[in-house]
Image (cartoon, rainbow, N blue to C red):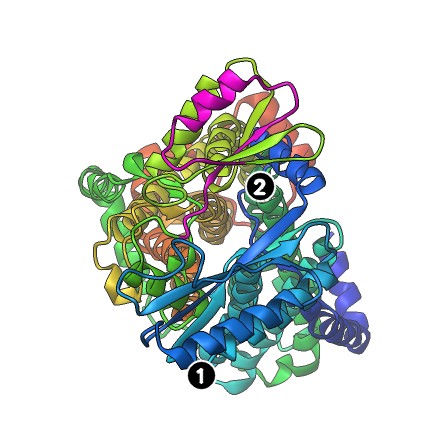
């Protein structure tokens, strides 16, 4: 299959390059339209109580969403400022789509006790379509910003989602401007030539275009999160460089034995292409676990990121071979080791050390990884608020200003209780008694909305406990709870219920793919265990930094008491797939060496010596990409970026350089064992490339 694909790409290289050129234009033209469609409704889970109540309110509540303006930095009693604010309030009331704007000078609670700040809340009409709502938001926000005061900020509600989308777009641009030159410089060091260094970037740009286009297409049928842009772009860029690096290193090796560029390309695709194919499939399978969750956000992220991985894989298997046919003749072959010098001798020495001291290596590395993973059991997730944004963002400045001038809890989203028709007065009274200052408003048709302001944060422990108490008190009454805290409670329950099934789906798929790749039953199990160790260690550090606040300031963040609910599932799914990436890079070389020599122990050393440099360079390049996306200062992306950076570096160094050779040495020839029926199945259906003539050294039977 791969040989046929290579021949197709090399027979018509200009056609292949033209088709990918059109794809790039489509991705950077049509695909960038996704930036206008981003949503911040991450915690919504179809079928849950909070979502049902929210849909009911959309249909029955005449009041729509709301935004908030804050004016600060000067005494609000100043006659000139009061006149400005009153004119602005009057003008905003006239904006089409605005339902209500209370006068902050006569509405209780709108003026700070210190007299240096006031709040201007704006409620929109219900039932507005997206275009009408956006026009209303723009007009109302712009008019409030015209108030002449030192600090004027507008955010909240749907405007917060738009501001996050704009921030996401800017962060992506900045990350690309930072990462691409750094990656190019590192590739120049690795290959020592501009042509070799530029080819991975061409594939990487294809991956970015694919990310935009995939997200745009998915936005036609589902919501796309503001987090999706950074996550898919960073992964698309990083994996494209990884795959291209693997292919180029193998191409230069093949050039040592043949001057025919086309033949070298065919051999490269037949050998390294197999690894790229299985790597792409394993990363995609790792992300299918997200499809098990009913969350629109998780499902859309899983589909979008998996699509980007497949695009990167196809670019490496089609576009890169076509480019190599056209320009590969000018790429020098890999240097031949000097007489008596072992290829990749540093990594060979590390492998031999780990194999000889296998028990000591395991006794040291495993406890260290477990210590790093200690914070994981105490991990907590939250929806988050504007504090997740950088300090220079308008939404964050608004929240900081409110926190500085108003009592705690001001502006906190309430727990919203929907009492449908048929709810008795006694139940409604018991619910109102759960929170001081609870307010009630009637709905058309006989229903009512009870809003209770929780102490602390909108998604804090007090708020989620309040949701649970309301659900206990209501008994059998037709009462539903929604709002930020209720959605978080439902999201947590959804994760707890579906996570085991997601894990089972991913592990089953990974084991099947690794068996098809290696023909072994024990290697997939060993791979899963060591990968989970590195993943737990990386996630533990993320909890320690962003939840507990240790060293968070070094990253321009702060400890928020919980991780963003987007971070853990994405870190787990993506990092698990990336770990499979490097595992396959190494196993492919070990398998080749074993088939040639039949020596299990030496195959481990040879495999690591020939793949160690590629794995290390790929991990470093991927870490650079992830680190570049951490420069934006958006806390969820910082969490995901740090988690993936650590997972990649730990996996490519501690796990692949030490744990893999140690465990392989411990297993010996049994590492490649499979029961006879499965061995026959692999011989019949397993995917393999053509192998060169092997020495007449017999491989032990049954292994």
Q: Mark 2 points at which residue?
A: 44
Label 1 to label 2: alpha-carbon separation: 50 Å
At 21% from the left edge and 41% from the top edge, which residue is drawn?
A: 371
Task: Say which element carries label 1.
Answer: loop
Q: How many discs appear?
A: 2
Q: What stretch of residues is rendered in magenta?
A: 411-440
* Mark 1 / mark 2, whichever is N-terminal: 2
In front of the other: 543 or 265: 543
- The residue under label 1 is 192
Q: Where is residue 122 in the image (x, y as percent from the top left)?
A: 55, 60
Decide whether residue 571 is among the magenta residues: no
At x 61%, y 76%, the residue is: 202
Left or right side of 6 for 259:
left
State whether residue 687 is above or below residue 308.
above
Q: Could one spot residue 464 in this view of the protein?
A: yes
Q: Quadrant of residue 186?
A: bottom left
- The local secondary structure at tag 2 comes to loop
Query: 487 or 507, which lies in front?
Result: 487
């Amino acid at each position: 299959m791969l040989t046929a694909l290579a021949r197709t790409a090399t027979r018509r290289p200009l056609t292949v390059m033209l088709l990918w050129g059109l794809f790039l234009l489509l991705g950077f033209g049509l695909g960038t339209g996704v930036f206008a469609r981003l949503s911040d409704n991450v915690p919504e889970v179809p079928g849950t109580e909070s979502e049902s109540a929210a849909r009911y309110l959309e249909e029955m509540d005449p009041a729509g969403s709301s935004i908030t303006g804050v004016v600060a930095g000067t005494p609000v009693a100043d006659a000139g400022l009061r006149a400005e604010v009153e004119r602005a309030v009057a003008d905003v009331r006239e904006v089409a789509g605005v339902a209500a704007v209370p006068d902050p000078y006569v509405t209780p609670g709108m003026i700070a006790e210190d007299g240096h700040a006031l709040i201007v809340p704006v409620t929109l009409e219900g039932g507005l379509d997206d275009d009408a709502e956006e026009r209303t938001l723009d007009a109302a926000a712009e008019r409030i910003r015209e108030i002449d005061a030192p600090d004027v900020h507008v955010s909240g509600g749907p405007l917060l989602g738009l501001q996050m989308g704009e921030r996401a777009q800017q962060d992506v641009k900045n990350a690309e401007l930072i990462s691409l030159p750094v990656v190019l410089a590192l590739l120049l060091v690795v290959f020592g030539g501009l042509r070799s260094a530029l080819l991975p970037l061409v594939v990487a740009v294809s991956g970015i275009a694919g990310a935009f286009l995939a997200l745009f297409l998915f936005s036609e049928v589902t919501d796309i999160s503001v987090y999706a842009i950074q996550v898919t772009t960073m992964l698309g860029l990083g994996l494209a460089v990884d795959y291209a690096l693997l292919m180029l290193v193998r191409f230069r090796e093949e050039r040592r034995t043949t001057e025919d560029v086309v033949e070298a390309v065919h051999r490269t695709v037949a050998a390294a292409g197999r690894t790229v194919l299985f790597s792409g499939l394993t990363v995609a399978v790792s992300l299918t676990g997200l499809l098990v969750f009913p969350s629109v956000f998780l499902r859309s992220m899983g589909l979008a990121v998996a699509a980007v991985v497949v695009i990167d894989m196809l670019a490496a298997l089609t576009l890169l071979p076509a480019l190599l046919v056209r320009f590969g003749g000018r790429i020098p072959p890999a240097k031949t080791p000097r007489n008596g010098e072992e290829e990749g001798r540093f990594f060979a020495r590390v492998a031999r050390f780990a194999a000889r001291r296998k028990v000591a290596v395991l006794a040291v590395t495993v406890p260290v990884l477990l210590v790093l993973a200690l914070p994981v059991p105490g991990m907590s997730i939250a929806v988050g608020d504007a504090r997740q944004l950088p300090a220079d963002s308008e939404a964050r400045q608004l929240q900081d200003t409110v926190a500085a001038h108003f009592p705690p809890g001001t502006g906190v989203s309430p727990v919203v209780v929907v009492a449908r028709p048929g709810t008795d007065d006694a139940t409604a009274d018991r619910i109102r008694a759960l929170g001081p200052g609870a307010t009630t408003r009637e709905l058309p048709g006989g229903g009512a909305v009870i809003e209770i302001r929780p102490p602390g944060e909108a998604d804090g422990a007090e708020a989620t406990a309040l949701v649970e108490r309301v659900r206990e008190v209501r008994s059998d009454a037709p009462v539903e709870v929604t709002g930020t805290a209720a959605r978080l409670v439902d999201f947590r329950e959804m994760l707890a219920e579906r996570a085991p099934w997601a894990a089972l789906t991913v592990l089953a798929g990974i084991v099947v793919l690794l068996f098809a790749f290696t023909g072994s039953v024990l290697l997939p199990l060993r791979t899963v265990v060591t990968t989970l160790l590195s993943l737990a260690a990386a996630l533990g550090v993320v909890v320690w930094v962003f939840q507990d606040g240790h060293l968070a300031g070094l990253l321009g963040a702060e400890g928020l008491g919980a991780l963003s609910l987007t971070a853990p599932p994405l870190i787990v799914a993506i990092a698990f797939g990336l770990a499979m990436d490097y595992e396959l890079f190494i196993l492919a070389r070990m398998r080749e060496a074993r088939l040639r020599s039949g020596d299990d122990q030496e195959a481990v050393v040879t495999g690591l010596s020939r793949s160690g440099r590629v794995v290390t360079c790929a991990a470093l390049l991927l870490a650079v990409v992830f680190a570049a996306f951490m420069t934006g200062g958006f806390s969820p992306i910082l969490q995901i970026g740090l988690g993936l950076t650590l997972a990649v570096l730990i996996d490519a160094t501690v796990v692949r350089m030490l744990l893999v050779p140690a465990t392989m040495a411990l297993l010996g020839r049994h590492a490649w064992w499979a029961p006879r029926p499965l061995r026959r199945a692999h011989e019949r259906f397993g995917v393999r490339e053509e192998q060169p003539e092997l020495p007449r050294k017999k491989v032990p039977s049954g292994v």
